[in-house]
Image (cartoon, helix red, strand yellow):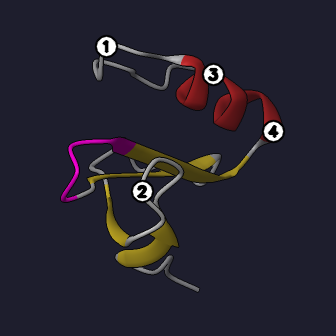
Amino acid sequence: MKPARILTFKCAKCAKPVKVFLQKVSACSHIQPYQGICACGEVKRHATGSPDAVKSYLASVDGNWQHHH
């Protein structure tokens, strides 16, 4: 089953809907990271997969997160 390419969430800052897009990652099923930017400028991140990989992705702040084995 392929992950969805686009998900929609409510912005934590302004409560408007924000679309997050599936990011390019290695051919790995451990994590599917998503990222998008709300109209208000707030960056929204979401991920599904391995709890450790998701935690690492959501904790990264510079946008240069990489998943390594």
Distance between the alpha carbons at the discs numbered 2 and 1 = 22 Å
Q: What residue is shown with label 1?
A: 62
Which element carries disc 1, helix, strand or loop?
Answer: loop
Helix, strand or loop at disc 2? Answer: loop
Gap between marks 4 and 2 measured at Cα: 27 Å
Give the distance between the C-alpha atoms of the residues marked 1 and 3, in whole angstroms: 12 Å
**Upstream in the sequence, badge 2 or badge 1?**
2
- Which residue corresponds to mark 2? 14
Residue found 49% across the figure and 81% down from its top:
2
Q: Nearer the viewer, mark 1 or mark 4?
A: 1
Amino acid type indicated by mark 3: Ser
What range is drawn magenta here? 39-43
Apparent side of residue 17 relative to residue 68 in the rendered image (left or right): left
Q: Which mark is residue 51?
A: 4
Q: Specify the label residue 56 is tagged with.
A: 3
Q: Residue furthest right?
A: 51
Q: Are marks 1 and 4 in contact (CB under 8 Å)?
A: no
Residue 27 part of the magenta segment: no
Name the amino acid, label 1.
Asp
